[in-house]
Image (cartoon, rainbow, N blue to C red):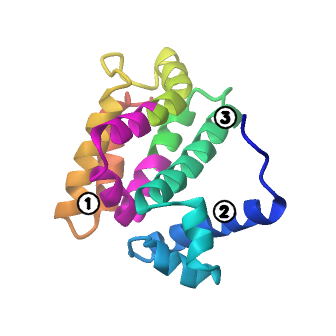
Amino acid sequence: MTVPRRSDALRNRAAIIRAAEELVVRGDAPSLARVARLTGLGQATVYRHFPDRRTLALAVAREHLALLAEAARRDAHDPAAFRSLLGAVMAYQVSMRPLVDEMRRFPEPDRRGHLRRLLDALRGPFDRSQAAGHLRRDVVLNDVVVVLTMLQAAVELTPDPRRAIPVLLDGLFRPQP
């Protein structure tokens, strides 16, 4: 049984995750020592919540996956929502490059688990978009992984990888009249 956390512990955890996100957006890897300095918390407090960088990175990614799942539920009635949701995932991949790079070094079970949770969050919007004729019929949900892999190549090889996002999205969707 999980013991409920005290409110100060919940605030500290949230502050740690926000600090890690801030470091990543700046282009820095979120080391636990840097997070401690940024939050003003002791390193022991940060380590109590997150014993290593992998655990912290997974927590940041899970927070964003929760926001994605919430957006998918909020837009459940809109069959066109998948395009904007996937576009948001792609923009996140570009803007959070240090986190993505960190996660790519994780053991296979962690990477596979994260991808499964991502696809689970996108499954409903994907299905509604395809049923409404917005998404090409020959596209399957696992093609999202292929598209994100292609975007990762753009991130690594081009000076402005955001330009690849609409090109990749256009490849998935049917032209609308």
Residue under label 1: 155
Residue drawn at point x = 46 percent, y = 41 percent: 86
Q: In the image shown, does 168 or 15 lie closer to the viewer?
A: 15
Q: Residue 13 at x, y = what percent?
A: 66, 62
Task: Give the mark, 1 or 2, whose residue is nearer the N terminus.
Answer: 2
Residue span colored magenta: 88-116
Residue drawn at point x = 31 percent, y = 43 percent: 148
Q: Residue 137 at x, y = what percent?
A: 36, 16
Please identify the quarter of the rendering in which residue 107 is found: top left
Q: Is residue 89 left or right of residue 11?
A: left
The answer to whether residue 97 is magenta is yes
Query: What is the crowding at mark 1: few (fewer than 14 residues within 10 Å), some, or many (at least 20)?
Result: some
Residue drawn at point x = 46 percent, y = 57 percent: 57
Tell which tag, 1 or 2, sits nearer the viewer.
Answer: 2
The secondary structure making up most of the magenta span is helix
The three-letter amino acid code for the residue at tag 3 is Asp
Local secondary structure at mark 1:
helix
Residue under label 3: 75
Task: Give the mark, 1 or 3, whose residue is nearer the N terminus.
Answer: 3
Q: Residue 63 at x, y = what percent?
A: 59, 51
Query: What is the crowding at mark 3: few (fewer than 14 residues within 10 Å), some, or many (at least 20)?
Result: some
The three-letter amino acid code for the residue at tag 2 is Arg
Residue under label 2: 13
Local secondary structure at mark 3:
loop
Local secondary structure at mark 2:
helix
Please identify the quarter of the rendering in which residue 139 is found: top left
